[in-house]
Structure formats: C-alpha cells, structure tokens
Amino acid sequence: MNGGTITEVGSGEAPRGATDVGDALLTPAFVDIQCNGVADIDFATTDADGWLRARATLARHGVGAFCPTFVSAPLDAYDDMLGAADASRSYLSDAHAEILGVHLEGPFLGGAPGAHDPKWLRTVDVDWLERVVGGWPGLLRVVTLAPEADPGLAGTRALVAAGIVVAIGHSTASYEEALRAADAGASVVTHLFNGMGPFHHRAPGLVGAALDDDRLTPTVIADLVHVHTVALRVATACKPGLAAVSDAVGVVDGLVERDGAAWLADGTLAGATTLLDGGLANLVTAGIPVARSVEAVTSAPARIVGATDRGVLRPGARADVVALDPRTLGVLAVWLGGAPVASG
C-alpha cells in the first residue's frame, strides 16, 4: 500500500515488515449507501461531535465509506441537515468512515410511507432539487422517490441529468410504472420488499420490476428482521448485483429497540440497528455464499454510486481493508487508507 491506495495484490511470500493476519478473511471495507444514524446518533439532528462519533463507530465495524441518509421532512428543514453533512464530509481521517454523499430518502414518496411521517410527503419539487444540487456541489449522491410522486417523471430526469442516482422506493407503483421510471433513468430500488406493494403473480409491481429488469439494482436490509431469509435468497438468485444496506437508525426519542430493530410506538418497523458487518454475517447465515455476500456489502453498493475506487482489492483502489474471522465473520481488524483503525 502507498499513499492510501493498494499498490499490489497477489499470493506467495509476504514482503518484509508486512502484517501477518493469519487465516483471517481479507475483504474490502464495507460501503453503506443508506445509513440514517448509529446507536443514539441521528444524522438529521446530531452535532459535529455526533457526526465524528458515528463515523468512528462505522469505521470500527468495517465501514470505509457511507451515504448519510435523511428521511422525509419539510423542505426548509434540509438546509441544516445538508450543511452539517457537508461540514463533516470535509473532515478526513483514517479513523473515520468517509462520507460519499447524502442519500435523500424522501420527502417525495408515495403510497407506502412506512415509518415516514405522511404529513411531510409531497410531490417532487424540481426547482428545489435543482437548488440543492447547485447549492451543495457534489453532496447529493442518491435520491429515493416514488414514481407516483413524480408527475411526468420530471424530477427523475432532472436528477439523472445532474449525475444523481435515482432510486425507486416507498412506492405502490405498478410493474409498468416502475419500468417507465427506469426508462427515465431510475437505476435502483430502495430496500426491496420493504416500503412497497407486494409481489403478486398477476401484478408483479415494484418487486417484480426490481427482480426482473436488468436496469434496476435492488438493495436489501440484511438484519433478518426486515426481510426473511428465503426472500434474501430469492432476491440474490435473481439479481447478482444486489446490494445490502444497513438502513441503520439512531435509537432516539420516539423509537424503541426491540428484536434487533427499531420500532415506532405504534409497532411500525422504523429501521435497523444492525450495521453492515452484522448484515454480511446474516447473508451468509441465510445461505448465500460468502463471496456473494461480501460483494453485496462492498463492490455492489460502491458500483451503484459510482465509487469505482471502493469495494475492491486491486491496485489503485483505496487501501480500505477488513480482516474477518473466517468462522464467525466478525471484524478482527480494519485499515482505512492503509492506516489501522483502533478497536474498541
């Protein structure tokens, strides 16, 4: 490794001074493109110290880069969130997971709001989106929206033209409506099975489009609460490029942690508390081969957001590496930019 990048990979005798990790499984650091918070930290409301604590926690769990995610809120509330994310993004440290850009999950959502407050849902405001893109250069990376909230798909087209990844989610779109969104440039389906209408053999809906159309890459929440192991296996078999996300949330006021997830008081599933290291182990537990499971938390999400130097172990890529216990897949050690990340 040199200058924070990988210079060489291969087999054979280790060079003098190399770190011997024994029989550990080496993988690229994980890439989480949907993370709302960590532990007791909510990215939408935390201060600068909270951002750093969350990024340090993610790094210790093997996450090298992530997209902080903001859920539905009034449009005038986002400036503070975006400003905080942009300020934290400028702080670069090998002890902290790097911010790839923000994921806006709402408020342009449709008929399957889930834990999103329905009073904040609205149709797409193209002028507002263009102001955000122009006002925060390079910050916006992913927008999840519902086709039924985007009349004429004008928002989808504008975002794609600006280089933003458009994901379909929290939607009751039909199969045909989902395909029209893909025609307009949508390329991802946010947390497959959750926040969308069910698959039916005569009305395949958004689930069917995600599994059938090569232009759409689904993400899944692999905490074994949001999605059954059978559904994980089916989705992975249908879509080799499927990516896992944590959808982790900070367990703050209004949320209760139970059964490995976060819930609203009315029993609505509101997000996960498992990070991507646990998600990787869960995918393997579900019967998905280790190599495919590793891809789901590394190269697949990196590819979705165009982070070509992430999620792979090859010369020229970021020297973000995780050593895993080959039996439990627990994180043994992490290097970001070639520098070791302290455990604990």
Image (cartoon, rainbow, N blue to C red):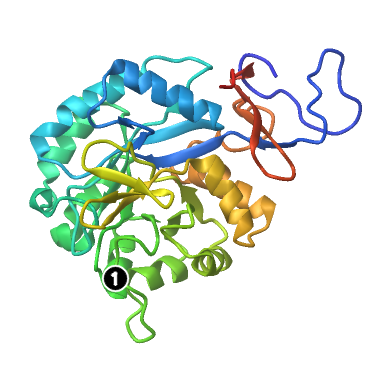
Residue that carries the numbered disc 1 in the rendered image: 197
Residue 127: image location, x then y, percent: 11, 40
**Residue visible at 38% across and 64% down in the picture:** 193
Q: Residues within 10 Å of mark 1 (few under 14, many from 20)?
A: some
Residue 187: image location, x then y, percent: 38, 55
**Residue visible at 71% across and 38% down in the picture:** 325
**Residue visible at 59% across and 26% down in the picture:** 318
Depth check, front residue: 137 or 263: 263
**Image height of 199 relative to 240, above or below:** below
Asked if one can make out residue 306 in the rendered structure from this viewpoint, the answer is no
Quarter containing the N terminus? top right
Which residue in the rendered view is the most extreme toward the right? 13
The part of the image, by quadrant, that contains residue 315 is: top right
Q: What's under tag 1, amino acid-wise?
A: Gly
Depth check, front residue: 149 or 340: 340
Residue 327: image location, x then y, percent: 74, 45
Residue 123: image location, x then y, percent: 11, 54
Secondary structure of residue under mark 1: loop
